[in-house]
Amino acid sequence: MDIDGTSALVTGGASGLGEATVRRLAARGARVVVLDMQDDKGEELARQVGGVFVHADVTNAEEVIAAVEAAKELGPLRSLVNCAGVGSASRTIGRDGTYESAFNLDHFSRIIAINLIGTFNCIRLAATAMSLTEPLEDGERGAIVNTASLAAFDGQIGQAAYSASKGGVVGMTLPVARDLAVVGIRINTIAPGLIDTPIYGQGESSEAFKAKLKKDVVFPDRLGRPDEFASLAVELITNSYMNGETIRIDGAARLQPK
């Protein structure tokens, strides 16, 4: 699928994996809507790539619709990449044996709401707009890429909520692909491993932490780079025979319990 002259929507697009994907899509000729809640970063990135920034919460239908409508103004919406997500660690039960110290249910619900329900919210709304575009070769109208995680398969201690949310993203990929086939929209999911993004901070302590993280990576002996994720995302969009798949990009890492 040729994305030159089309529009694309990237959630969580202001930094990290999303930012790298925005830049890759723009380099291929797409006009990109950067959906994020980081106004300063999002506006600057959109300015740099000739796109548009929309402040939006992925769980808010009205705000996501506004982002979709902004994309339609730039050209036919053919691409959605879901990078927005949150994560943190907490064990299922506390050490003191009290009910109060068990995993906070509101916290669990928030992670599921953003990572899983938010992803589906963006899928259903962007796909609705894509379904109204003129079909291309083989009846294709658009492509969607989701972001899961190795935690969907190798969840570590304390990752129950995060793993559940990312496992849900993996689990819905095939049925959504089957749902959207009728209108010529493909959907795939990337499960990234340990990617070197700003989430790990900067400085000596950060570098020491990242060096410890990479112990589970087989080869190459480093963390992944955001642009490597972005390269795969663009390939999944443009390769018209890729559909219904979840692909790990992790240097053959298999995470240990902790």
Image (cartoon, rainbow, N blue to C red):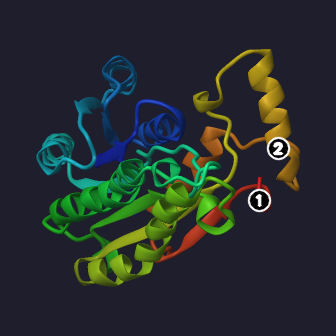
Nearer to me, 227 or 87: 87
Q: Quadrant of residue 155?
A: bottom right
Q: Residue at x 44, y 47 (%)?
A: 83
Q: Secondary structure at mark 2?
A: helix
Circle 2 Cα neighbour tier, 10 Å, few/some/many (<14 / 14–19 / ≥20): many
Residue 122 image point, x, y percent: 27, 56
Q: Secondary structure at mark 1?
A: loop
Which residue carries the number 1 mark?
A: 257
Residue 209 image point, x, y percent: 78, 31
Which amino acid type is marked by label 2? Answer: Lys
Residue 111 lies, with reference to residue 198, above or below; the image says below
Residue 58 image point, x, y percent: 28, 47
Nearer to me, 146 or 45: 146
User: Does residue 155 appear in this view?
Assistant: yes
Along the polypeptide, which appears first: circle 2 or circle 1?
2
User: Does residue 220 appear in this view?
Assistant: no
| 82 relative to 210 in the view: left or right | left
Residue 182 lies, with reference to residue 159, above or below; the image says below
Circle 1 Cα neighbour tier, 10 Å, few/some/many (<14 / 14–19 / ≥20): few
Q: Residue at x 24, y 84 (%)?
A: 182
- Report the disc number at residue 214: 2
Nearer to me, 165 or 34: 165
> Across the whole image, how many numbered discs are drawn on residues?
2
Task: Give how far apart the Cα atoms at labels 2 and 1 are.
Answer: 14 Å
